[in-house]
Image (cartoon, grey):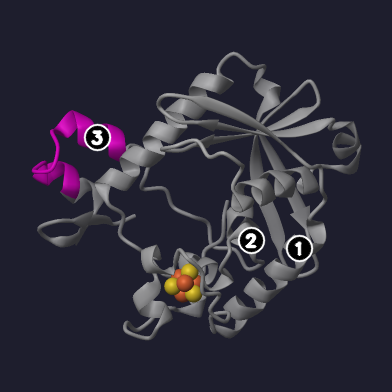
Amino acid sequence: MRIKCPENGEVTPEECIKCGKCFPEPILKSLLAGRDYKRTHRKRPRFGVTYLISNCLRKSYYQLTEEVPIELEKLWIFSRGHAIHNFFQKDLPKESIEIFVKKNYSVFDVIGYVDAIYNNVLYEFKTINTVPQIPQDAHILQAQAYFSLLPEEKKEKIKKIKIIYFSLSSIRVFDVPKRDISPLLEAKGTILAQALKLGKPPRKQKNYLCDYCEFKELCIGEKEPSFDPSKIIYED
Ligand code: SF4
């Protein structure tokens, strides 16, 4: 992982801690702890759910093939979300939280971690600045994707899917229809796997988030890709 440095472009986590200009060392150490993980090289594509429910597969392609330096502020957002997840998971039985799910399709695998399944209800936790009035489409798809990846006998037992939004000041709960979106995951994963095999990004899926997309310059050809097919990395 590379850190986006306001003074020196990109730095490693070690260089960032050593410099210490942005934040004191204890803060930097906490923000950067465990972030320099290595991903295993795999021959067979293995996608996390979020790559397939994304509203732009081209973006997912770039996420898998390009290293993007990350801002410290973003790490704080991730860390805060993680801490809130932990708070709501800590009193649930161990076997009810962070449940690993996996499904093999013909040319790729999909994996994910369900936040919690308790009393046959599947929960997806979302930390957000402002809780929405209705659940976001991407979050509905994500929760339904986890449901779809459950083994059949577990899937049959699920009574409800709930998305719980947490902001710093409120909590809101939504019920989401139980829907098996395996065909959608299969269709999108096949496109992504093929694009990676050919080293050619999928077509643009222009949307309202394009202006905030960290790959915009690459996408519109203002920056050269650094893609090297031998360096594709997939989720562990
Ligand atoms: S700029 Fe828009 S179309 Fe291009 S990769 Fe990002 S989200 Fe997709």
Q: Residue at x 59, y 54 (%)?
A: 50
Q: Which residue is mark 3?
A: 29
Quadrant in which the N terminus is drawn? bottom left
**Badge 2: few (under 14), some or many (20 or more) residues near its Cα, within 10 Å?**
many
Q: In the figure, residue 70 lies in which quadrant? A: bottom left
For this orientation, the residue located farthest to the front is 133
Q: Amino acid at mark 3?
A: Lys
Sequence-wise first label, 1 or 3: 3
Q: From the top left corner, tell me how far across and down residue 179 is, in percent.
A: 82, 48
Secondary structure at badge 1 equals helix
Q: Which mark is residue 107?
A: none
Residue 226 in sight: no
Q: From the top left corner, tell me how far across and down residue 6 is, in percent.
A: 14, 56
Secondary structure at badge 2 equals helix
Q: Amino acid at mark 2?
A: Leu
Q: Which residue is mark 1?
A: 184
Q: Residue at x 53, y 25 (%)?
A: 171
Residue 162 is left or right of residue 210, and the answer is right
Q: From the top left corner, tell me how far across and down residue 16 is, in percent.
A: 18, 47
Sequence-wise first label, 2 or 3: 3
Magenta span includes 111: no
Q: Quote the CA–CA distance across marks 1 and 3.
A: 40 Å
Instruction: For ligand 1, tell me if the residue under mark 3 lies within 8 Å.
Output: no
Magenta span of residues: 16-32
State whether the magenta stretch is mostly helix, strand or loop: helix
Q: Amino acid at mark 1?
A: Leu
Q: Is residue 69 above or below residue 75?
A: below
Q: Which mark is residue 52?
A: 2
Q: Nearer the viewer, mark 2 or mark 3?
A: 2
